[in-house]
Image: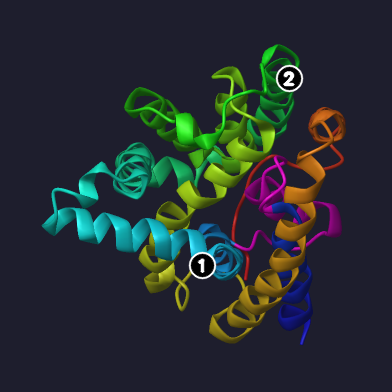
Amino acid sequence: MDDVLRSVVLGLLQGLTEFLPISSSAHLAIFPKFFGWSDPGAAYTAVVQIGTEIAVVLYFWRDIWTIGSGWVRGVFSRAARQEPEWNMGWFVIIGSVPIVLIGLALENLIDSEFRNLWVIGTTLIVLGIVLGVAERVGRNAKPIDDLTWGHAVLFGLAQAAAVVPGVSRSGATISMGLFLGYERAAATRYAFLLAIPAVVGAGIYKLKDIPGGDNAYGVGPTILGTVVAFAVGIAVIHWLLRYVSTRSYAPFVAYRIVLGSVVLILLGTGVITADIAING
């Protein structure tokens, strides 16, 4: 029962933080330490994220259908390759390549050293500052229809930085979009679409580890946590897209810096330890 309740809490946390630029993986590593729980594990973290990505798929199903069907038509029709859906399909594919290659190359580090809380606390602060600078200097002008091949690659490289917990997939991608001059809402929307192949792929890849030692909770609680993450994620997407159309990311910048600082202070004073280990 303890594992079920903990998985529900972490699923709730995942749903609340996945789409905000504050790093869901950082929260899934930090908060168990605050509560004295064992680390849920890299496999749990990857699989529970599938719940929030299913929320993305359902919320953006019209966009996904339009882009996907347009891209498929373009494979067979020269005329269809003149439509914007053809390019957008390729932009998502190309933007997904960096995180796949880097994720596979650094898999062992992602599952171990990168989950050290000194690393997470530092990246929360550093990427918070990056997001704040991007918010300040970004022109907030370009619609997503202005996306180019070069910018798609840069978005992809930014997303790939999120293999390190604390960076935030949405935070890094949105920051890049702001630096490149895109509207906040456009950058946020594209960040959601770009994350779908990477997160779903990582979750499916990690399914094999759920029954084993890289997951503190086992199959049943992990499934429940994933369902909770999905339900909460739907509400958060709806709220965030309305929020960023008129408001800045400043509160998230402040939150990242405060949380990262708290983590580093607690580590420095010995209140919590930096190591991440599965103890069952």
Q: In this view, does 242 lie to the left or right of 90?
A: right
Q: What element carries label 1?
A: helix
Disc 1 marks which amino acid?
Trp
Tell me the element at label 2: helix
In the shown orientation, is residue 203 left or right of residue 176?
left
Q: Quadrant of residue 51?
A: bottom right
Q: Which of 144 and 13 is in front in this view?
A: 144
Q: What stretch is highlighted in magenta?
A: 18-40
Q: Nearer the viewer, residue 1 or 93?
A: 93
The C terminus, quarter of image:
bottom right
Residue at the spot x=56%, y=50% of the render?
Answer: 192
Quadrant the N terminus occupies: bottom right
Residue occupied by mark 1: 61
For the residue pair 28 and 240, the one nearer the viewer reads as 240
* Residue 34 in magenta stretch: yes
- In the picture provided, is 88 more to the left or to the right than 240? left
**Residue positioned 71% across, 76% down in the render:** 228
Colouring convention used in this rendered image of the protein:
rainbow
**Mark 2 or mark 1, earlier in chain:** 1
The answer to whether 42 appears left or right of 95 in the picture is right
Q: Where is residue 84 in the image (x, y as percent from the top left)?
A: 36, 43
Q: Can residue 265 be seen in this view?
A: no
Q: Amino acid under label 2?
A: Ile
Q: Residues within 10 Å of mark 2 (few under 14, many from 20)?
A: some
Hey, which residue is sitting farthest top in the picture? 137
Residue occupying the point 67% across, 23% down: 140
| Above or below: residue 67 compared with residue 127 | below
Question: Residue 227 sits in which quadrant?
Answer: bottom right
Question: Where does residue 214 sit, x and y in percent of width and height?
Answer: 49, 65
Q: Identify whether 34 is placed above or below 266.
A: below
Q: Mark 2 points at which residue?
A: 129
**Tag in front: 2 or 1:** 1
